[in-house]
Amino acid sequence: MDQWVEAGIPAPIAASFLEAGASLEEAHAWMASEITTDDAVTFVRGKVAVDSASLWLSKSEFSADDVVDFIRKEVSLEQALGYAERGIGSHQVVRTADGLELDIDPWQEDPLDQLPQVIEPGSFSVTLWTSALGGDPVAHEVDFSWNGGFVAGWYEDISMRNDLSYGSSSPAHGLLAWPGGKDVAMTFNWGELGLEGHDRLPGMAPRGPVEATDPKFWIGLAGALIDFVLLDLGSRSSDDTVQYSDDEDWELDIEDMFRQFLDSGAATAGIEFQEWIDQKVAAGTYTVRTDE
């Protein structure tokens, strides 16, 4: 102990390092780093080197105990960061003779496991867990029907994985299109709340036809739709809904209007859906319906 104190290490700190089994040289190395003494002692006990500990702490928000646990289980930093993105702690990772196994909650499952590696045109579903409204994670499901181009149908509802009754269902649906390759234009209809209209998901379009076959794109799109329904539509009023009729006074459906818009080629020419509607109204083709 006297040698440590003479070397400039306070007695309480020296005692902690000595108890953990560190040499005087190792203690100096830890004290020269930006790692706290308590964490350094944890790393010494876990036989983690200074450089390795510094790297883990600089790249993550893991505690020293978590880092030691991950390293003991031969989990790489990259793997650990991937687990952290899904909310998986080191205590949920188990090293077995066959490799790593996870003891996880349903909302920590990798949503990519639900989809094939390459998405083909047709119908498919994605279930995601969200805490957007606060509280415990709740599962929501998004069904897609994709034409293989830049148009897809969507249907969003709470998932029965929550062990709820069918009376809890309150679906919203609509169409999606990304002819411009940047934003996703969309229609929505939430019958139970009397909401109908159109909007955009900024920056959500795939960057080309190859990315449109990537399951990650559809996972991201599903998450954006769930947030849109819960946080955006959920705060709107049915008074915001604008309804239109044609020149024969037939009430128009927003999805039918959107399909006509897409079929007209206006979208690929860079015309916005609302701009196209306004042109139709100005020409007398469409009329804004008002309650009488």
Image: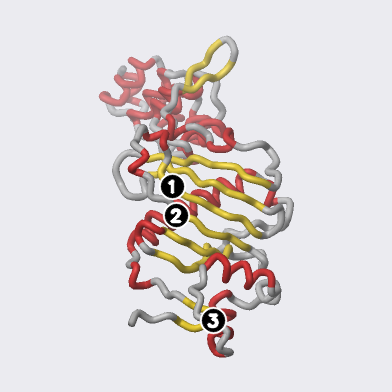
Residue 116 in the image, given as x and y percentages of width and height:
66, 36
Question: Would you say 163 lies left or right of 276 here?
Answer: left
- Residue assigned mark 1: 157
Query: Would you say the residues marked 2 and 3 are in contact, meaning their CB atoms lie under 8 Å apart?
Result: no
Query: Would you say the residues marked 2 and 1 are in contact, meaning their CB atoms lie under 8 Å apart?
Result: yes
Residue 177 position by quadrant: bottom right
Would you place residue 101 above or below residue 175 in this image?
Answer: above
Looking at the rendered structure, the secondary structure element under dot 1 is strand
Front-most of residues 83 and 228: 228
- Residue assigned mark 3: 248
- Type of the residue with mark 3: Glu
Residue 85 in the image, given as x and y percentages of width and height:
48, 39
Which image quadrant: the C terminus? Answer: bottom left
Colour scheme: secondary structure
Image disc number at residue 172: 2
- Type of the residue with mark 2: Ala
Return the residue found at the far front: 248
Q: Disc 2 to disc 3, how far (Cα)?
A: 28 Å
Looking at the rendered structure, the secondary structure element under dot 2 is strand
Task: Give the residue displayed 45% in from the left and 28% down from the top.
Answer: 67
Count residues near mark 3 (Cα–Cα under 10 Å), then give few for <14, some for 14-19, many for 20+. few
Task: Give the residue displayed 62% in from the left and 45% down from the top.
Answer: 123
Front-most of residues 123 and 69: 123
**Res 32 seen here:** no
Image disc number at residue 129: none
Task: Give the residue displayed 45% in from the left and 51% down from the top.
Answer: 226
Q: Which circle, 2 or 3, is nearer the viewer?
A: 3
Residue 232 in the image, given as x and y percentages of width and height:
39, 61
Question: Would you say 36 lies left or right of 180 here?
Answer: left
